[in-house]
Image: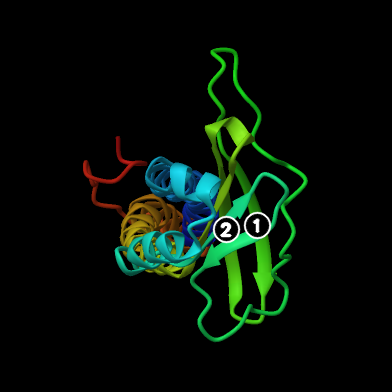
Amino acid sequence: RINVVIVSSVLLLSVALSGVVFVHNRTLLEKELDKRGAEIGNSIAAMGSESIILDERFVLHEIAAKARRGSDDIRYVMIVDYAGEILAHTFGDGFPAGLPLELPRSLPRPDAGGEATYAVTRYRSNEGPFREVVVPVERGAVGYVRVGLTEQDMRHILEKNIKNFSFITLVVCLLAAVVATRLAYRIVHPIDQLAQAAGQIRQGNYGVRIAPDDQAEVGR
């Protein structure tokens, strides 16, 4: 019973801790992924601002394609004008189902310093979930860059962390079981000896003796 209590307590604590660690790691990975998408979007915005104004769609396509090839995390890049018209994109085989082609409602707004930040929207398409980071070009007066990021690598990292934490939890539970077994023996064994001696006394055997054990908890 002592073993069950100790191992159950360790297991429950490990499960609770793993949940906290999972949420924390996921939040950090999402922030890093969004930050990376914003950096890529700002780079595209800086290079393509003039081409958006001049409607140089071939140049914009080359910029988007180069950015797409430069990172495995990027699923797509779309460059749109201020009205939301798509000027260039990297979908060579058609748009995935579930991806809205119009601009998202949560467009980035200028912060207190006057600089426009970025907005993140999560979509689920026939290719799985992905995150879209929208970066304004010239604070949105010229257009926007939409960078779609896959969550596949992030999911692999989380799955690896869960496996590692599960292995550590198993090892800790095994150690807790060994310690609990040893502790239970040190507590219960002297009590069993006393119970047996009491039984002998009830039967009239007054010469029964119990050797003292200084290592046992009861013996102390």
The residue where tag 2 is placed is: 131
Residue 212 percent across, percent down from the top left: 24, 45
Q: Are marks 2 and 1 in contact (CB under 8 Å)?
A: yes
- Judge whether 43 appears above or below 220 on screen: below
Foreground residue, 186 or 203? 186
How busy is the neighbourhood of tag 2: few (under 14 within 10 Å), some, or many (20 plus)? Answer: many
Tell me the element at label 2.
strand
* Outermost right residue: 105
Tell me the element at label 1.
strand
Foreground residue, 27 or 73? 73
Q: Residue at x 29, y 46 (%)?
A: 216
Q: Residue at x 51, y 49 (%)?
A: 54
The residue where tag 1 is placed is: 122
Quadrant (top left, top right, bottom left, bottom right) of the C terminus: top left
Cα distance between the residues tagged 2 and 1 = 4 Å
Quadrant (top left, top right, bottom left, bottom right) of the N terminus: bottom right
